[in-house]
Image (cartoon, rainbow, N blue to C red):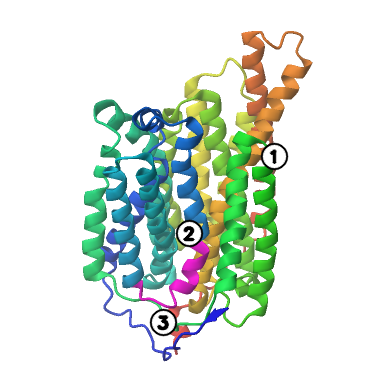
């Protein structure tokens, strides 16, 4: 089940005349609008239910399908980057995203709107690893932290801005403007990218194993879908546990196949680099913690505005953390970051009924600043250890596991919060009392953040094993 391609000559990539500024502008604008769309519809769902006369479970497919398609497509980008030039892939991703945006904006029915969202997600799934891989290659090791920090700003600020921006637009205009407003930014990204973005990877055209793509789709798709639906349906629902079983079996088969075939679509040799493996584990844990704070705060306090100040600070601190990484190395940035994550989790576990909104915002700001110190420096340090031929695979692994970790973290913490609430009400003498119901919500809140504190302590232990190591330079690898 292999597709055979023509193997290109081992031609060196010339980076001497690359214009980094317009390239990074094009990449970051495209990535910003793509990630923004993950949360942009959150406040528009009631309007969409009314406009198309659909149920809450139906309208949720606009978010579920988007996340699912991105999770399925990202692993495949590693092999696509060896078949097509960087310019071709980027323009394909952005034009696809733009086409999906136009389709959604003009949608006469819910089916067309959902189709537009899926097309948008196809572009997003292609775009994220391409952007990260391009930044890795066009910037020398001593400047990668700052560049990846800008990527972190986009990745954190865009989804945080989505709910607030959608609320403002829905109040003053209608839901179609959520898509209209994205179009000019996508067009600018395409024009600048078409002019300045050159190829940064060798075109080798390896054989493509179709069975691996099928297993990857079933594996990652099944896991992301089952965990994302478990919060609504529960683990006892056949739709949840059967998709999880299919996903796990397919993923195990996929892993064994990648280790055996000559041209894996996701090269797991990256895990032979201990630093890379360590950083992957740390990223997964921190990513789960990020989804904890989002899910629990929104569920408990019903306000995206509570999360906005912290998310803005996170975006502002992401480039700063990158610069600190470039200057002082990973330990000086990452270890204090995970310690602050643990402190924030501990502070959240002590919240009671007398808590003020300002206290919640302050602790959340501390948590998001801490995450900014950890996320992009961790990924940059891990990817710096790889050889250039493994960059596409490394970026695809990080991007894929972030999607999977997010789904797992969301499910775990919703489950733990619900269990904490149920345990409290079972012991209550008057479970129907509004005061007791409120206290049960706080008990669930504390239970979820206690689990987050455990994860943070594990992250601290892992971070202590981080060592400063010399990154591989592209020019040296091409000699």
| Sequence-first tag of 3 and 1 | 3
Instruction: Say which element carries label 3.
Output: loop
Q: Is residue 332 left or right of residue 93?
A: right
The answer to whether residue 469 of the structure is visible from this angle is no
Q: Quadrant of the N terminus?
A: bottom right
Q: Which residue is mark 3?
A: 202
Q: Which mark lies nearer to you, 1 or 2?
A: 1
Q: Which residue is mark 1?
A: 235
Q: Which mark lies nearer to you, 2 or 3?
A: 3
**Dot 2 alpha-carbon crowd within 10 angstroms: few under 14, some 14 to 19, many 20 or more:** many
Q: Quadrant of the C terminus?
A: bottom left
Q: Residue at x 64, y 67 (%)?
A: 254
Q: CA distance from mark 1 to mark 2?
A: 41 Å
What are the residue bounds of the magenta stretch?
73-86
Q: Which residue is mark 2?
A: 325
Q: CA distance from mark 2 to mark 3?
A: 28 Å
Q: Quadrant of residue 198?
A: bottom left
Q: Residue at x 55, y 41 (%)?
A: 291
Relative to 391, is 104 above or below? above
Q: Residue at x 29, y 26 (%)?
A: 171
The stretch drawn in magenta includes residue 79 = yes
| Sequence-first tag of 1 and 2 | 1
């Amino acid at each position: 089940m292999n597709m055979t391609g023509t193997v290109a000559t081992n031609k060196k990539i010339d980076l001497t005349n690359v214009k980094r500024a317009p390239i990074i502008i094009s990449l970051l604008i495209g990535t910003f609008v793509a990630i923004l769309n993950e949360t942009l519809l959150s406040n528009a769902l009631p309007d969409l239910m009314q406009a198309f006369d659909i149920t809450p479970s139906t309208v949720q497919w606009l978010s579920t399908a988007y996340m699912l398609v991105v999770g399925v497509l990202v692993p495949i980008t590693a092999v696509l980057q060896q078949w097509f030039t960087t310019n071709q892939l980027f323009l394909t991703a952005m034009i696809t995203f733009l086409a999906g945006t136009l389709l959604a904006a003009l949608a006469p029915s819910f089916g067309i709107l959902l189709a537009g969202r899926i097309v948008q997600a196809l572009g997003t799934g292609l775009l994220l690893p391409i952007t990260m891989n391009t930044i890795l290659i066009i910037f020398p090791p001593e400047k990668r932290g700052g560049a990846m920090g800008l990527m972190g700003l986009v990745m954190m600020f865009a989804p945080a801005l989505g709910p607030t921006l959608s609320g403002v637009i829905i109040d003053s205009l209608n839901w179609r403007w959520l898509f209209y407003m994205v179009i000019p930014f996508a067009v600018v990204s395409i024009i600048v990218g078409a002019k300045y973005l050159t190829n940064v990877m060798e075109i080798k055209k390896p054989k493509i194993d179709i069975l691996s793509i099928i297993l990857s789709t079933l594996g990652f798709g099944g896991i992301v879908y089952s965990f994302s639906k478990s919060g609504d349906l529960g683990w006892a629902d056949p739709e949840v546990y059967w998709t999880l079983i299919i996903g796990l079996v397919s993923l195990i088969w996929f892993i064994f196949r990648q280790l055996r075939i000559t041209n894996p679509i996701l090269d797991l040799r990256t895990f032979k680099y201990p630093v890379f493996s360590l950083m992957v584990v740390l990223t997964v844990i921190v990513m789960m913690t990020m989804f904890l704070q989002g899910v629990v705060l929104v569920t408990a306090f019903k306000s995206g505005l509570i999360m906005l100040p912290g998310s803005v600070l996170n975006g502002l601190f992401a480039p700063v953390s990158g610069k600190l990484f470039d200057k002082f190395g990973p330990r000086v940035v990452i270890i204090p970051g995970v310690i602050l994550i643990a402190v924030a989790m501990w502070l959240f576990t002590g919240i009671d009924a007398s808590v003020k909104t300002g206290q919640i915002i302050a602790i959340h700001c501390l948590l998001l600043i801490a995450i900014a110190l950890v996320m992009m420096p961790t990924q940059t340090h891990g990817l710096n250890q790889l050889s250039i031929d493994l960059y596409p695979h490394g970026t695809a692994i990080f991007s894929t596991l972030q999607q999977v970790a997010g789904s797992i973290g969301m499910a775990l913490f919703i489950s733990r919060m619900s269990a904490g609430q149920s345990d409290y009400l079972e012991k209550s003498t008057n479970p129907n009392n509004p005061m007791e119901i409120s206290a049960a919500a706080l008990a669930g809140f504390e239970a979820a953040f206690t689990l987050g504190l455990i994860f943070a302590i594990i992250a601290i232990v892992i971070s202590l094993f981080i060592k400063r190591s010399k990154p591989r330079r592209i020019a040296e690898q091409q000699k």
